[in-house]
Image (cartoon, rainbow, N blue to C red):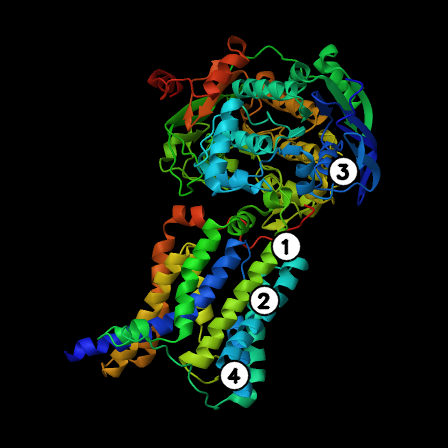
Amino acid sequence: MSAELALLGPILAAMLAAATPLLFAALGELVVEKSGVLNLGVEGMMLVGAVCGFAVAVQTGSSTLGFVAGAAAGAGMAALFGVLTLLLLANQVATGLALTLFGVGLSALIGQGFVGIPIADVPELYIPGLTDLPVIGKALFGQDALVYLALAAVPAVHWFLYATRKGLILRAVGENHAAAHALGYKVVRIRFLAVLFGGAMSGMAGAYLSLDYTPMWAEGISAGRGWIALALVVFATWKPGRVLLGAWLFGGVTIAQLHVQGLGIDIPSQLLSMLPYLATVIVLVVISRDVARIRLNAPASLGKVFHPDA
Amino acid sequence: MSSLPHRLELRGITKRFPGCLANDKVDLVLKPGEIHALLGENGAGKSTLVKIIYGVLHADAGQILWNGHDTRIPDPAGARRLGIGMVFQHFSLFDTLTVAENISLGLDQPGPMDALSVRIAEVSERYGLSLDPRRHVHNLSVGERQRVEIVRCLLQDPKLLIMDEPTSVLTPQEATRLFETLRRLAAEGCTILYISHKLEEIRALCDTATVLRGGRVVGSCDPRKETARSLAEMMIGTELSTPERLPQGEAGAPKLQVRHLSTTSDNPFATNLKDVSFEVRAGEILGIAGVAGNGQAELMAALSGEALVPDPASVAIEGRPAGHLGPRERRLLGLAFVPEERLGRGAVPELSLSENALLSGYAREPLVRSGLVHFGRARSYAERIIGAFNVVTHGHRAEARSLSGGNLQKFIIGREILQKPRLLVVGQPTWGVDAGAAAAIHRALIDLARSGAAVLVISQDLDELFVLSDRIAVLFHGHLSESRPTHHTSVEEIGLLMGGLFNHPPDEDEVDRAV
């Protein structure tokens, strides 16, 4: 087996892992936006999820409890956002930005005592036969459970949105909240549940970062992935399958630039570190030029405040 | 009939909003199988009352009896369970969903989508409302959208069907078809509560009418025994003055010439204009009819300057190419325009009337001096508009959104007319405006034309166009028909044109004559 081929397996594995937090966060935000709410606080919810997950895992020694805590913390942050925007009718953009700033500070405060503490990695799966396959075996069948959970969430979210009645109602609320209200649907309740789901998914994304991807806590560990997740949702024109492609693109470029850095090519490493963000933004801009596709898929009530009596 | 209990009886329904009494001890009796009209001006409390019946709002006091039993209607789902269906004036449809998905959302037990599609096909067949369950709503015409709403109600086997201004968006032929459906439903025992301000329709369709004014029931009658005039006078409570048609003066020089205007839009929901040509001369009113969504919004935008057109010569104001100019430059050339949406386009809801007067008045009134606003003049300009057009408000400081639709529309039209424009373009001048204000607006537009200005009215209301226009043309799928002199055409003929029965593109001759 040539050396290049031997590299393929680890690269593929690393790419899937790098895409996982984006998938969690972007799929959560996709459901939130489909219900007509724009929550710009993904980055903040990820950070709080990351630190709470890490803290619980350190205290209890259980990474499973850590993930549960991360999701719960993300949902808690989202509940705060929901109360402010859906019940008190605050502006969604401003509230979302504030949520991120709040999350950055809160996570640093909670995480003060946890910097530099090591934690056991989440065990990887072993499927006899498949995991032993040459080249791709370890990459495709030897990851930890969270990677597969994120991948499974793609068809699950798609199925929920497009094949179930609850998904239909959620899309209807995002499309035209006044009409949904007139038909007797509880717009605020449905949106609140969607926002909670989005928060839990962001929290999972954060916990994945601190428990598994780089098993440690550091301030600002999400490094802007929350913002990329937000951009991905638009880039994917609110379709789960395209979110997967976008996450892989980001993950792939992340890993590729690391390898380029490793090869010692004479490009400043700061420039290379920018690449995944740059590539994702450029693709986003190119795709967004198709205004027709955006308009057909964008939830028409996105970001609009809903007054039940108006 | 008298042995049967009433289908629905309201006793003393009262609903108060901050600052107004929307319904004041309203009594209403609906019998099985009758078509009952609910009449009233804007703000008379019709919408509030039907929202209470449909469970969207709750009455502060009063009693609702359904088939003789005291009932509480907690929410729309509860109303649907009783057998009450409602077709909204502004459709409660979802553009990016399919017909079947839309209908499913309005049902409590929709069942699987395939079975539902079959039921939709059956019901639409039975009542002559053809519909394809798989199509997306944004591809449907307005008439088809209404069918979606009606089929949605019919699938629930309603005992009472509420129709809120159902024909305001239909061609006359579509309206006739709707009436047949409604009569068939009534014959099967369904009660229909029909809300409209089109009095001729009510006389043709309804068995009974209840008239609301200021939140109270002021009378009921058999509309077939009344005239449209007597019904209107019951509604507004005073005598109605309709504008008289003065003999048309000589049409003067062309003020607005549109030649081979075509547009392209990024918006997939837009209707592009296709080779539209017409002209409006000094002293005349040209009416453009058509069902909403056939290119009216795009034509308004291309004329006002909100959308620039590629060829500057395709829109000429007073003979000067203006297609490349923005709204401000076009206003300086002598154009004034009143957009269709009052709040958000015609006026800024949160600004006071004097600030709103300034927004377009700067072009031709001395309201701005070396870049600074002259508030004193803006205020007196606003007060002049309020006085001249009889706008009911508590003064020039009132926020635009605090005015009723009719009063705000009078203010906006007054703001443009007092600038003495040579060319005025108006979209839907009396949409959602009560009869009294509509008559005042019609008179002002006719007076403006008789004083030598050219006026273009784009409206879906055929009655209005026949009152106002010297010539009428029809917009369909982005094509414009040839114009016809109003006294040489009929509602039926224009109705057929609105359904697309004309040859496009229009003759080259007319365009050449326009040049």
Chain letter behind tag 1: A
Asked if the residues shown at circle 1 and circle 2 are in contact, with their CB atoms under 8 angstroms apart, the answer is no
Badge 4 marks a residue whose secondary structure is helix
Asked if the residues shown at circle 4 and circle 2 are in contact, with their CB atoms under 8 angstroms apart, the answer is no
Residue at 56%, 49% in the rendered image: A173
Q: Nearer the viewer, mark 2 or mark 3?
A: 2
Point out the image quarter for the C terminus of chain B.
top left
In the image, B62 versus A46, the foreground residue is B62
Q: Nearer the viewer, mark 4 or mark 2?
A: 4
Measure how far apart labels 1 and 2 are at the Cα level: 14 Å
Chain letter behind tag 2: A
Measure how far apart labels 4 and 3 are at the Cα level: 65 Å
Position of B3 with respect to B206 (left or right) is right
Q: Quadrant of residue A16?
A: bottom left
Q: Which residue is disc 4 drawn over?
A: A57
Amino acid on which disc 4 is placed: Ala
Chain letter behind tag 3: B
Chain letter behind tag 4: A
Q: Of the residues under marks 4 and 2, which one precedes in the sequence?
A: 4
Reply above or below: B17 against B140. Answer: below
Q: Quadrant of residue B35?
A: top right
Amino acid on which disc 3 is placed: Thr
Reply above or below: A275 against B220. Answer: below
- Which numbered marker is on residue A78? 2
Q: Which residue is disc 1 drawn over?
A: A188
Amino acid on which disc 2 is placed: Ala
Measure how far apart labels 1 and 4 are at the Cα level: 34 Å
- In the rendered picture of this protein, how many numbered marks are placed on residues? 4
**x and y percent of residue B416 in the render?**
61, 33
Measure how far apart labels 4 and 2 are at the Cα level: 22 Å
Measure how far apart labels 3 and 1 are at the Cα level: 35 Å
Q: Nearer the viewer, mark 1 or mark 4?
A: 4
